[in-house]
Image: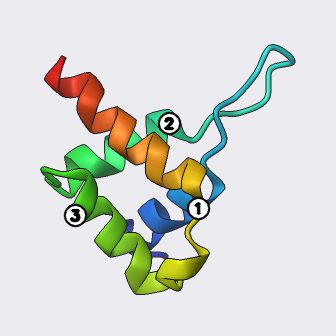
Amino acid sequence: MPVPEYLLAMKCMAARLGGPAGEGSDVPDIRFLIHHLQLKSAAAVLEIVAQYYPANRIPLKTQYLVEGLFEESRG
């Protein structure tokens, strides 16, 4: 069974947002894992992702999604 940190990294790397045709979204799982792991910042999430994937290979959409989730919770 994968550890929660690895699941978070995989979900963040996929960063599927869903769509009108019923495609799945990774956002609810990412939110759940952030809460479960008690992460307090986008930097903390991206640090976990970088433990499993090279930092230079983390897509911009992943960075924007993670940062947006924390901005959402502040607003």
Say which label, 3 or 2, has the lower sequence index: 2
- Identify the secondary structure beneath mark 3: helix
State the residue at coordinates (47%, 67%). Answer: 9
Task: Tell me the residue that label 3 is attached to.
Answer: 44
Neighbourhood count class around disc 2 (C-alpha, 10 Å): few under 14, some 14–19, many 20 upward: some
Which quarter of the figure has residue 35?
A: top left
Left or right of 22 in this view: 54: left
Q: Position of residue 31 (x, y in %)?
A: 35, 39
State the residue at coordinates (53%, 53%). Answer: 62
* Labels 1 and 3 touching (C-beta < 8 A): no
Say which label, 1 or 2, has the lower sequence index: 1
Q: Is residue 8 above or below residue 32?
A: below
- Identify the secondary structure beneath mark 1: helix
Which quarter of the figure has residue 74?
A: top left
* Labels 3 and 2 touching (C-beta < 8 A): no
Quarter of the picture containing the C terminus is top left
Which mark identifies residue 27?
Answer: 2
Task: Tell me the residue that label 1 is attached to.
Answer: 13
Q: Is residue 40 above or below residue 5?
A: above
Q: In this orientation, which residue lies closer to the viewer: 18 or 46? A: 46
Three-letter code, disc 2: Val
Neighbourhood count class around disc 3 (C-alpha, 10 Å): few under 14, some 14–19, many 20 upward: some
Q: CA distance from mark 1 to mark 3?
A: 15 Å
Q: In this orientation, which residue lies closer to the viewer: 60 or 29? A: 60
Three-letter code, disc 3: Ala
Q: Position of residue 52 (x, y in %)?
A: 47, 83
